[in-house]
Image (cartoon, rainbow, N blue to C red):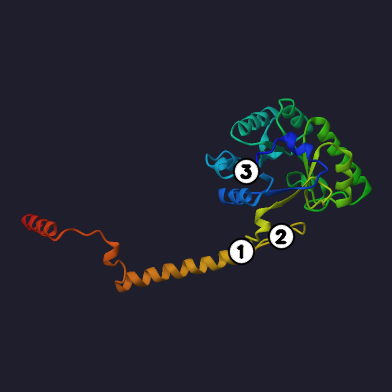
């Protein structure tokens, strides 16, 4: 029987294969990840704190978090971390400074950092593009990951980084590297469910693999929705709805008494 893994479990598994990781945003997605056997999930605070979350996802290692743009001061972030951990999170994501990471890690909060294409910091690396394609960028990534480790983070998401670079970094450090488009030399492979399921019509990142076409299914369901509404309109207009089976009956004697009472009202 599966159990909820601990940080210690995940660290002990380093170098022994890759875990699977998804970004989930609904209870249904979390339940599906649980049933499928996914190892790690990233999710918004409102989902991990939902009263039903652990009912549907009892053994998913669950990371929530805030970007540095949302977190405020390092004390604000620590308070956020404590609240999330007390309500069921297993780790907390932080794109903030190393001082913020260290501040939380000193209080034994399992912290996950972020390197490479970090959306909330993308202006510093040239926008939404790969990072680490030059030797200078690659060594800076290594130094950043090492600094995360020294600050107390136990894992770092490596996003859109050349596979060779991430593999070399992972092999030289104790912290876990979670790959989003960073190759198979990391400790987990991370995808967003919206990309994996193809449930939107926007850009699908190159690093993602689409396993289902939910967008087409949503289109089909929308047409079915419109068709059902039109049939309802037609039934109302023709008198086909409501039928007797849709109504509450009244005994004939009670109806007669009601009508007699109405008659007395004038």
Q: Nearer the viewer, residue 140 or 245?
A: 245
Residue at image location 29% in from the left, 71% down from the top: 239
Q: Which mark is residue 45?
A: none
Q: Which residue is mark 3?
A: 44
Q: CA distance from mark 3 to mark 1?
A: 22 Å
Image quadrant assignment for residue 62? top right
Asked which secondary structure carries label 1, the reply is: helix
Residue 165's spot in the image, x, y percent?
88, 48
Q: Which residue is mark 2?
A: 204
Left or right: residue 93 compared with residue 176 = left
Q: CA distance from mark 1 to mark 2?
A: 12 Å
Quadrant in the picture for the N terminus: top right
Quadrant in the picture for the C terminus: bottom left
Asked which secondary structure carries label 2, the reply is: loop
Q: Is residue 12 above or below residue 133?
A: above
Image quadrant assignment for residue 106? top right
Q: Which mark is residue 215?
A: 1
Q: Is residue 117 above or below residue 85?
A: below
Asked which secondary structure carries label 3, the reply is: loop
């Amino acid at each position: 029987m599966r159990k909820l893994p601990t940080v210690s479990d995940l660290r002990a598994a380093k170098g022994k294969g890759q875990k699977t990781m998804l970004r989930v945003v609904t209870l249904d997605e979390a339940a599906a990840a649980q049933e499928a056997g996914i190892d790690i999930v990233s999710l918004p605070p409102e989902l991990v704190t939902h009263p039903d979350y652990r009912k549907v996802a009892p053994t998913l290692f669950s990371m929530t978090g805030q970007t540095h743009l949302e977190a405020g001061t390092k004390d604000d972030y620590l308070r956020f971390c404590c609240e999330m951990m007390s309500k069921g999170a297993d780790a907390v994501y932080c794109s903030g400074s190393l001082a913020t990471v260290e501040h939380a890690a000193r209080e034994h909060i399992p912290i996950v950092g972020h390197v490479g294409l970090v959306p909330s910091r993308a202006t510093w690396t040239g926008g939404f593009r790969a990072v680490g394609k030059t030797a200078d960028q690659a060594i800076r990534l290594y130094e950043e990951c090492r600094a995360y480790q020294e600050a107390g983070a136990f894992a770092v998401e490596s996003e859109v980084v050349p596979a060779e670079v991430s593999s070399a970094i992972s092999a030289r450090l104790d912290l876990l590297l979670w790959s989003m488009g960073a190759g198979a030399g990391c400790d987990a492979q991370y995808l967003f469910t919206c990309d994996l399921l193809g449930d939107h019509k926007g850009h699908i990142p190159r690093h993602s693999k689409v396993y289902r076409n939910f967008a087409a299914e949503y289109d089909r369901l929308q047409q079915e929705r419109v068709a059902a509404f039109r049939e309802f309109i037609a039934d109302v207009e023709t008198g086909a709805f409501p039928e007797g089976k849709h109504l509450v009956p009244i005994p004939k004697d009670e109806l007669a008494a009601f009508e007699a009472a109405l008659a007395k009202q004038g």
